[in-house]
Amino acid sequence: MSLSLAFHPDTDHLRHIVKSLSLLSPRLEDLSLRRGGPPSGGFANIASPGYRPTLRGTETCELLGLTSFTTRRMFVAYDALLGLGGLPHLRKLHINPPFEASDWAPPGQERRDAFFVALEELVLTGKKGNHQGCIDFVGIITPTSLRTVTLDLRWPKDGTAEALFAALCAALGGLPCHGTIKDIKITLGFRDDRDENIYRSPCFAPLLELHALQSLSIEGGPKVVVDDATLDAMSRAWPSIRTLRFAWPTSPRLNWWEQSLYDRAYTPPGADAPDRPGATLAGLVPLALRCAHLEELEVAIDMRAVPTFDGHRRPPVFVKDARLACKVKALCTEGCVPGDPWAVASFLSLVLPRLGSIGGSTPRATWERTFYFYRVLQAVRFQERDWAIGHRKNFKDPAGL
């Protein structure tokens, strides 16, 4: 059932609707409540910025057959969440946690026993100053089979963003269902309201407990700076990972003349720059080696130092069977620092042999040259392998698995 609700001056209006639904449709399974457009006439005064329609009351516990609950353009208070949390079959929850502190739990709440125990899909929106409610909510639920977590958040612009993000990751890593969470998507900005804060490696440490993770995507323009050690730890913790995306702010779309000026003016970040990438090309090797299902990769990398494998008795990755090679088909370079195009292309043709595109950021000319060399070397790599197979040569497996 989907209901689009008009503005109403009675603060208990939403509560009465839920109570009525529990009496009229006790076996209701799917409920979606959406606040309608701005009011007019006599109710126009309640459309002020301070008006925040909120579902309150424990009547939600009477919807015993509910499997999916969604709200849009309204908040859900703590007492209503207490009612929802005890429902035995609720598998999908899409809500805006409360904005007002008076509508939330007392500080210092710990995880509640059997609270949203059947939950499989969680979507939280914290774009209206209720970001702390999202963090707190993740910190008190105890699902046993949660699979998907989607968070759309906006941090205050007061320098606390990284600490808030770290607290959110700690809450996610502390969930009791380590073996079931497969997909996490966190959006921290949108279009002209990009996040552009910097989040460093220690923030992600709690997420390494989620060993079944298949997709981690951080979007909205943040600058995620992870180092090689963190990428190595991720490759060990998430062997089934398919998507690993830390989407940096995108470069502006320019015509060829403007782009050439941007390319000429490009300077790499200095050694002390806070947004200088911490990862190097060497950090890609454990991902390519251990994460056989990895298909989407977007990480800021400093490519000026190119590892050399000359003299090594074993290759860094599998080279005998193309099916064992890393499946990543596109390398987005937002946030990356380019290196020597030929050297970078040579390295990538060995470690990421299936790429169909490289680039997307300034300096575009350098990335285009890198990709041109890559395509040439990619063909050479295939010829090398085919020749070796045809001449019955021995292929050594990489060491360090």
Image (cartoon, rainbow, N blue to C red):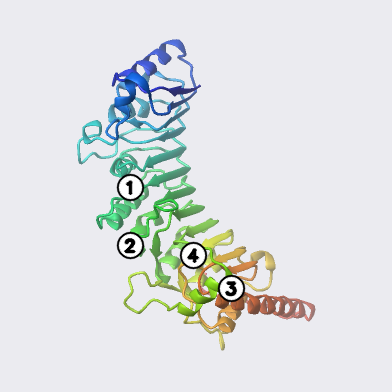
In the rendered structure, find residue 202 and report the number of the disc placed on it.
2
Q: Residue at x 28, y 36 (%)?
A: 99
Say if 396 sits above or below 58 in the image. below
Q: Nearer the viewer, residue 391 or 331?
A: 331
Image-based side of 120 in relation to 97, left or right: right
Q: What is the x, y in percent for residue 187?
A: 42, 50
- Which comes before the other along the chain, label 2 or label 1? 1
Q: Residue at x 32, y 39 (%)?
A: 137
Q: Nearer the viewer, residue 167 or 112?
A: 167
Q: What is the x, y in percent for residue 165?
A: 33, 53
Does the CB distance between marks 1 and 4 fall below 8 Å?
no
Image-based side of 327 in relation to 239, left or right: right
Name the mark nearer the viewer: 1 or 4. 4
In the rendered structure, find residue 312 and report the number of the disc placed on it.
none
Does the CB distance between marks 4 and 3 fall below 8 Å?
no
Name the mark nearer the viewer: 2 or 4. 4
Does the CB distance between marks 1 and 3 fall below 8 Å?
no
Q: Is residue 379 visible?
A: yes
Q: Residue at x 28, y 21 (%)?
A: 11
Say if 392 sits above or below 142 in the image. below
Determine the secondary structure under disc 3.
helix
In the rendered structure, find residue 171 and report the number of the disc placed on it.
1
Name the mark nearer the viewer: 4 or 3. 4
Does the CB distance between marks 2 and 4 fall below 8 Å?
no
Label 3 – label 2 distance at C-alpha: 26 Å
The residue beneath circle 4 is: 251
Which image quadrant is residue 97 in?
Answer: top left
The residue beneath circle 3 is: 351
Which image quadrant is residue 280 in?
Answer: bottom left
Q: What is the x, y in percent for residue 71?
A: 42, 30
- Which comes before the other along the chain, label 2 or label 4? 2
